[in-house]
Amino acid sequence: MALEDRNRVVILEDRVENISGADFPMGFDGKDVPFHLESFRDTLDIRIIRVTPTDIEFDLIGVDASIANALRRILIAEIPTMAIEKVYMISNTGIMQDEVLAHRLGLIPILADPNEFQWKRSGDPPTDQNTIVFKLDVVCKRNHGVPETEVDPKKKYENSSIYTSHLVWDPKGDQGDRFASNPIRPIHDDILITKLRPGQVISCELHCEKGVGKDHAKFSPVATASYRLLPDIQILEDITGDDAEFFCSCFPPGVAKVIEENGIRKAKIVNPRKDTVSREVLRHKQFDGKVRLTRIRDHFIFNVESTGIIPPEILVSQALDILIEKCDISKKALEKAVKGNREDN
């Protein structure tokens, strides 16, 4: 593999080449490719592609896969949120066992700013500074006046389905004033928790605490955080006529299109980021030697979906802050180790 192809993963019909990283980030097959901070600053780039209330898509360019993966893992596991940690079951006569019900309650995303709360260590008592309290008290009853022939439980019974809207926040201390403008509540009101039938009761108290995803997935602020390499599709020889139409059909919509130049219809790549790298085009002999499929090794397309607790753009900013903090800790530890070695010598 040529040195100029060091940042390309090559997709062939039956295999993928140049996939392995080197012994050190941004290195290549033992070649002398020294790291320069200035050139790294010039090539590093972050491009925001799309932002919605729950999703963000951005490109991270000019870094090694280890950095991209560190950012992904931080998004999943190291940004704190508030989640239900303890369930004090007073009464549960429904069909769902206490343990299963408590587990489902724990996975409900809670809209509360974790920066407003302290960490609750082992042995610490619950206070208004480290704990949020919810109560769930529901009784299923039969609705009077409903025809005997009615079969819909929602019409036949009251509280036949228990949703997150049934959770009632119980402010402690000054929480009522602190969060008066944005009351603490579940992110969604329509998450089904369990179902009941007449005479069945659920009564419990729920305590939310601050935590991170590496302790339990319920604390993770993202539903998903993933990245993929940017596809790079190179047309090596003109593909014309009917072959151009067929060539475009080998890719997802929007990747390629047929254009006309000097009265000749030719295939052209217009948006390679939409490609899923299915390699369909490599199955057809008429395209042998005419197309090259690669992925750019240092161009990462990130897709982050928030659970709704923290806006996605804030999540990315917080993840970068944590990554910088980790780098500072590593730098200080390395400097200390080097200094110690020098003193020993």
Image (spheres, rainbow, N blue to C red):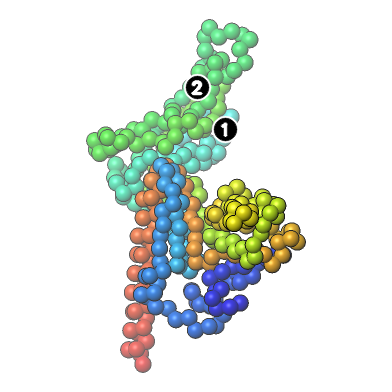
Amino acid bearing label 2 = Asn
Q: Which residue is under mark 2?
A: 159
Select label 2 or label 1 by which is in front: 2
SS at badge 1: loop
Q: Position of residue 143 (x, y in %)?
A: 52, 12
| Residue at 51% from the left image edge and 41% from the top image edge | 103
Q: Is residue 187 left or right of residue 97?
A: left
Question: Around disc 1, counting alpha carbons within 10 Å, would you say few (fewer than 14), some (14 to 19), or many (20 or more)?
Answer: some
Amino acid bearing label 1 = Met
Q: Position of residue 132 (x, y in %)?
A: 35, 40
Is 318 located above or below residue 307 in the figure?
A: below
Q: Quadrant of the C terminus?
A: bottom left
Is 69 located above or below residue 168 in the figure?
A: below
Q: Quadrant of the N terminus?
A: bottom right
Distance from disc 2 to disc 1, alpha carbons, whole Å, reads 15 Å
Q: Is residue 144 visible?
A: yes
Question: Around disc 2, counting alpha carbons within 10 Å, would you say few (fewer than 14), some (14 to 19), or many (20 or more)?
Answer: many
Q: Position of residue 288 (x, y in %)?
A: 72, 65
| Residue at 33% from the left image edge and 84% from the top image edge | 339
Q: Is residue 222 visible?
A: no
| Residue at 62% from the left image edge and 49% from the top image edge | 252
Q: Which residue is under mark 1?
A: 96
Q: Is residue 259 left or right of residue 63?
A: right
| Residue at 42% from the left image edge and 43% from the top image edge | 52
Q: Earlier in the sequence, mark 2 or mark 1?
A: 1
Q: Position of residue 76 (x, y in %)?
A: 47, 54
**To which quarter of the image does residue 182 belong?**
top left
Instruction: Work out whether residue 46 or residue 306 is closer to the camera in this orientation and state it.
Output: 46
Please tell me the numbered disc located at residue 139: none
Instruction: Work out whether residue 284 or residue 76 is closer to the camera in this orientation and state it.
Output: 284
